[in-house]
Image (cartoon, rainbow, N blue to C red):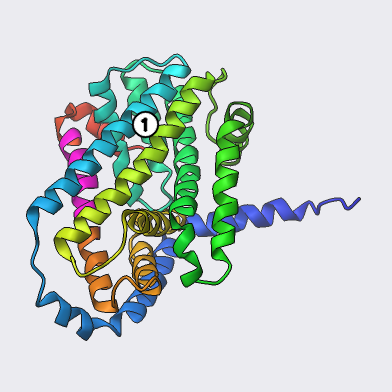
């Protein structure tokens, strides 16, 4: 049996500290920005030609926006259910305010600010901060797992066009997601405990009821379906020339969004999601580069408004003292 070197942990800690340093993050963001411009810049003329024909069908954009806001409402309720399973009762109105403000944290590199903000604001509302942060962490894990499951199931039929053999991988991932949901109540407490220990976050003291876990899982699955349908409606309103069935839009949106989310240094997945979206749409033969770039850019602006505006409104409605305390959080 090999004994780990005592120097190994310190090297990992030094590497983690270097990645967290603001200078390192700025440098990584600059490299990412250069790569994005280099990747999409060659299609500038094609995009300009397509943009000249751009005509926005606002009823479709309005329908897409309504679906996204309905998804937000469902995710707030999912967080409330998880929080309630740990004994933290929170009125829906307060939960909306806390959730929308914390959702602004996805625009800070690292994407973990939102979990801390949920805990702080929930504690100020009289709920256990540990339970709130734990529910947020668990909700994030469920959301990522559900996203991969939905992507695998809805995109299985077209993935071979991206790379041969991906369809089989997607089917296996989809089957694994279904099995994972069935064993969730027994596995999740250990998973969240290990992730919380890894991220040095608090874990709630008691185990969640199975019904709370399954409700949150179903809500997160439906959220990805809703996002994908909203994306399809938005595409119909902005770039109707892009072809594809609802399952394709759900799979493409889920895959690109997840890639952007998992790149921790990119605030809100900025740039990563756009490049992935263009690559997937063109690989599937749904559209040309110009239309794909227009859809990726306009959908980003659309989602920024829908993500940021509710949080800013909630933030402005906070008492001044709470805004100051929240601003001072690291």
Q: Quadrant of residue 321?
A: top left
What residue sits 24% from the left and 36% below the top? 70
Quadrant where the C terminus is found in the figure = top left
Does residue 217 lie above or below 46 as drawn? above
Report if residue 330 is visible in the image: no
Is 306 inside the magenta-drawn segment? yes
Residue 47 is left or right of residue 198, and the answer is left
Can you give x and y, in whole percent of width and height, for residue 123 in the image? Answer: 37, 21
Is 179 inside the magenta-drawn segment? no
Report if residue 253 is visible in the image: yes
What residue sits 46% from the left and 33% below the top? 217
Residue 181 is left or right of residue 94, and the answer is right
Can you give x and y, in whole percent of width and height, for residue 52 in the image? Answer: 9, 77
Can you give x and y, in whole percent of width and height, for residue 145 in the image? Answer: 50, 44
Can you give x and y, in whole percent of width and height, for residue 43 in the image? Answer: 27, 82
Mark 1 neighbour class, 10 Å CA radius: few under 14, some 14 to 19, many 20 or more: many
What residue sits 32% from the left and 17% below the top? 90
What residue sits 49% from the left and 21% below the top? 211
Which residue is nearer to you in this view: 215 or 300? 215
Q: Secondary structure at mark 1?
A: helix
Residue labelled with disc 1: 118
Does residue 24 lie above or below 73 as drawn? below
Q: Quadrant of residue 318?
A: top left
Does residue 228 lie above or below 211 as drawn? below
Does residue 154 lie above or below 127 as drawn? below
Number of marks in the rendered image: 1
Q: Which contiguous range is marked in magenta? A: 300-314
Which residue is nearer to you in this view: 169 or 315? 169
Q: Quadrant of residue 249?
A: bottom left
């Amino acid at each position: 049996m090999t004994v780990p070197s005592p120097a190994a942990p310190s090297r990992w800690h030094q590497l983690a500290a270097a990645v967290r340093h603001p200078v390192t993050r700025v440098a990584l963001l600059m490299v990412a920005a250069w790569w994005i411009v280099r990747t999409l810049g060659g299609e500038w003329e094609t995009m300009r030609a397509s943009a000249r024909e751009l005509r926005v069908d606002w009823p479709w954009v309005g329908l897409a926006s309504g679906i996204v806001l309905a998804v937000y409402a469902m995710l707030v309720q999912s967080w409330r259910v998880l929080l309630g399973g740990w004994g933290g009762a929170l009125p829906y109105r307060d939960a909306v305010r806390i959730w929308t403000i914390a959702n602004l944290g996805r625009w800070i590199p690292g994407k973990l600010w939102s979990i801390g903000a949920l805990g702080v604001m929930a504690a100020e509302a009289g709920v256990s901060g540990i339970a709130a942060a734990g529910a947020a962490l668990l909700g994030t894990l469920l959301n990522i797992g559900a996203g991969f499951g939905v992507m695998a199931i809805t995109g299985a039929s077209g993935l071979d066009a991206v790379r041969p053999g991906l369809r089989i991988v997607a089917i296996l991932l989809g089957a694994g997601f279904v099995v994972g949901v069935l064993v969730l109540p027994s596995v999740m407490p250990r998973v969240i405990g290990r992730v919380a220990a890894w991220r040095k976050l608090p874990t709630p003291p008691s185990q969640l009821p199975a019904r709370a876990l399954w409700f949150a899982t179903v809500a997160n699955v439906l959220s990805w379906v809703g996002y994908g349908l909203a994306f399809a409606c938005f595409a119909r309103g902005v770039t109707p020339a892009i072809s594809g069935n609802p399952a394709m839009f759900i799979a493409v949106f889920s895959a690109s969004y997840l890639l952007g989310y998992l790149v921790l240094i990119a605030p809100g997945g900025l740039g990563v999601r756009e490049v992935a979206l263009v690559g997937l749409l063109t690989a599937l033969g749904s559209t040309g580069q110009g239309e794909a770039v227009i859809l990726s850019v306009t959908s980003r602006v659309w989602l920024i408004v829908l993500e940021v505006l509710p949080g800013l409104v909630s933030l402005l409605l906070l008492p001044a003292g709470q805004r100051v305390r929240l601003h001072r959080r690291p």
